[in-house]
Image (cartoon, grey):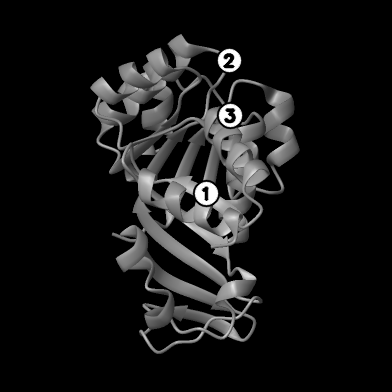
């Protein structure tokens, strides 16, 4: 299902940046916050903004929250308000509900409420930066689940000029190269005969252990 309309509850740093990027990508965004100053700041950026308390059911009904494809609860400083707003979005039948969690406990509560996706911005960014700092070949790192990861890896010098068949990433580590970002464009589902160069970025998917073994091999120059 393609999502076109988003309602974001909470226009702090996370919510406002999320809204800005969604609008930049061409989507419609309604921003809701109790803070008039935050709403005013984004009034000319988001598609619509409203000063309101999203923990009140009538407020969400009046703005037509149930008609949005996705509701994002981006409240970070008030866990009670975050939970209440999330409950209301679920009860109103919003197709997809995403919520920001500020702690593991907060996340567990949201999970039990049936939230479609839980985001831990500070924790996730910390993990990504840590991996980038200790592995020079790792350009980006996203944990898809507790078991699987997708990573962007720079091609090491020793692989330049070799085909995917030659490097045999799946045979060595069990992970797969699902795309190659070359200067001339992205190759999705590359073939075994596709050749790598040091200018390329590989998009690799596998278990956390497989990705870690692959990184260690790159760092050691194997």
Question: In the drawing, does residue 71 fall left or right of residue 25?
Answer: left
Q: Give whichever of discs 1 and 3 has the lower sequence position.
A: 3
- Relative to 25, does residue 87 appear above or below in the rendering? above
Q: Give whichever of discs 2 and 3 has the lower sequence position.
A: 2
Q: How crowded is mark 1: few (under 14 residues within 10 Å), some or many (20 or more)?
A: many
**Residue 141 - label:** 1
At 54% from the left and 28% from the top, the residue drawn is 123
Foreground label between 1 and 3: 1
At 51% from the left and 68% from the top, the residue drawn is 202
Which quadrant: the N terminus? bottom left
Q: Can residue 26 be seen in this view?
A: no
Distance, label 2 to label 1, CA atoms, is: 27 Å
**Measured from the top left, where is residue 104 in percent x and y?**
41, 18
Foreground label between 2 and 3: 3
Q: Can you identify the residue that label 3 sits on?
A: 122
Q: Can you identify the residue that label 2 sits on?
A: 77
At 66% from the left and 53% from the top, the residue drawn is 136
At 40% from the left and 29% from the top, the residue drawn is 60
**Measured from the top left, where is residue 7 in percent x and y?**
47, 40
Q: What element carries label 2?
A: loop
Q: What element carries label 1?
A: strand
């Amino acid at each position: 299902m393609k999502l076109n309309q988003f309602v974001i509850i909470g226009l702090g740093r996370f919510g406002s940046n999320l809204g800005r990027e969604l609008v930049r990508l061409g989507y419609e965004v309604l921003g809701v916050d109790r803070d008039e100053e935050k709403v005013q700041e984004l009034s000319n950026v988001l598609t619509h903004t409203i000063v309101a308390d999203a923990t009140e059911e009538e407020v969400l009904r009046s703005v037509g929250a149930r008609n949005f494809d996705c509701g994002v609860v981006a409240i970070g400083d008030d866990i009670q308000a975050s939970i209440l707003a999330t409950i209301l979005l679920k009860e109103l039948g919003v197709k997809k509900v995403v919520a920001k969690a500020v702690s593991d406990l907060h996340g567990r509560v949201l999970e039990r409420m049936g939230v479609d996706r839980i985001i831990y911005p500070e924790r996730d960014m910390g993990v990504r930066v840590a991996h980038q700092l200790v592995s020079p070949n790792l350009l980006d790192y996203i944990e898809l689940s507790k078991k699987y990861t997708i990573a962007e890896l720079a091609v090491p010098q020793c692989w330049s000029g070799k085909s995917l068949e030659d490097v045999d990433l799946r045979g060595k580590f069990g992970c797969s190269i699902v795309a190659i970002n070359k200067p001339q464009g992205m190759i999705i589902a590359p073939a075994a005969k596709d050749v790598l160069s040091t200018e390329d970025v590989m998009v690799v998917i596998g278990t956390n252990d497989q990705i870690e073994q692959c990184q260690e091999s790159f760092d050691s120059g194997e």
